[in-house]
């Protein structure tokens, strides 16, 4: 996952995890005026959900298995903080349902301890067993 930097914690029993993402100048976050493009928060959330789902699957997942965003059932941008290169955002992911390679996740995104966005999305992420 290109936009995910660290899986901070994982709770297998609750199917939850937290993922951090550091906004660097080398990634495609900024427009020509060096202002943050807020649609990238949604992509960070999608990659965070896939990271947590893959980590929860343990040995059935590795970075080479394909994944696709299937639907965004909810996307709410609560605020537009003044983000700069070097800032970190934290995604908290809860996998709500999972049927084979299809999962639905609820994600909240925090910046400096405040929730800035939330989303509910479904995605397909192959496991080694679904690839054979």
Image (cartoon, rainbow, N blue to C red):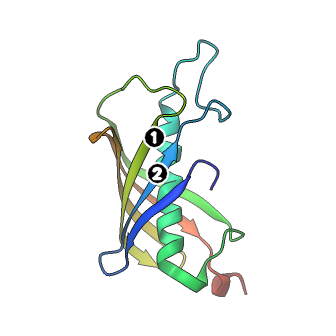
- 8 on left or right of 86: left
- Residue, x 53% and y 18% (percent of image)? 35
- 56 on left or right of 93: right
Q: Residue furthest front?
A: 86
Q: Quadrant of the N terminus?
A: bottom right
Q: Secondary structure at mark 1?
A: strand
Rendered view: 60 above or below 42: below
Q: Residues within 10 Å of mark 1 (few under 14, many from 20)?
A: some
Rendered view: 66 above or below 72: below
- Residue, x 40% and y 66% (percent of image)? 9
Image position, residue 38 (x, y; %): 47, 30
**Marked residue nearer the N-terminal end (2 or 1):** 2
Q: State the residue position of label 1.
A: 88
Snapshot quadrant of residue 32: top right
Q: Residue furthest top?
A: 33
- Residue, x 40% and y 48% (percent of image)? 90
Q: Are marks 2 and 1 in contact (CB under 8 Å)?
A: yes
- Residue, x 52% and y 63% (percent of image)? 50
- 61 on left or right of 88: right
Q: How many marks?
A: 2
Q: State the residue position of label 2.
A: 20
Image position, residue 21 (x, y; %): 50, 47
Q: Residues within 10 Å of mark 2 (few under 14, many from 20)?
A: many
Image position, residue 10 (x, y; %): 40, 71
Q: Secondary structure at mark 2?
A: strand
């Amino acid at each position: 996952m290109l936009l995910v930097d660290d899986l901070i914690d994982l709770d297998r029993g609750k199917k939850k995890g937290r993922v951090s993402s550091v906004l660097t100048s080398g990634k495609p976050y900024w427009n020509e005026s060096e202002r943050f493009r807020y649609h990238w928060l949604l992509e960070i959330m999608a990659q965070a959900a896939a990271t947590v789902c893959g980590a929860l699957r343990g040995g059935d997942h590795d970075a080479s298995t394909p994944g696709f965003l299937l639907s965004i059932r909810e996307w709410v941008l609560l605020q537009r903080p003044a983000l700069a290169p070097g800032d970190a955002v934290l995604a908290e992911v809860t996998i709500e349902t999972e049927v084979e390679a299809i999962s639905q996740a609820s994600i909240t995104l925090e910046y400096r301890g405040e929730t800035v966005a939330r989303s509910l999305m479904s995605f397909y992420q192959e496991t080694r067993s679904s690839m054979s």
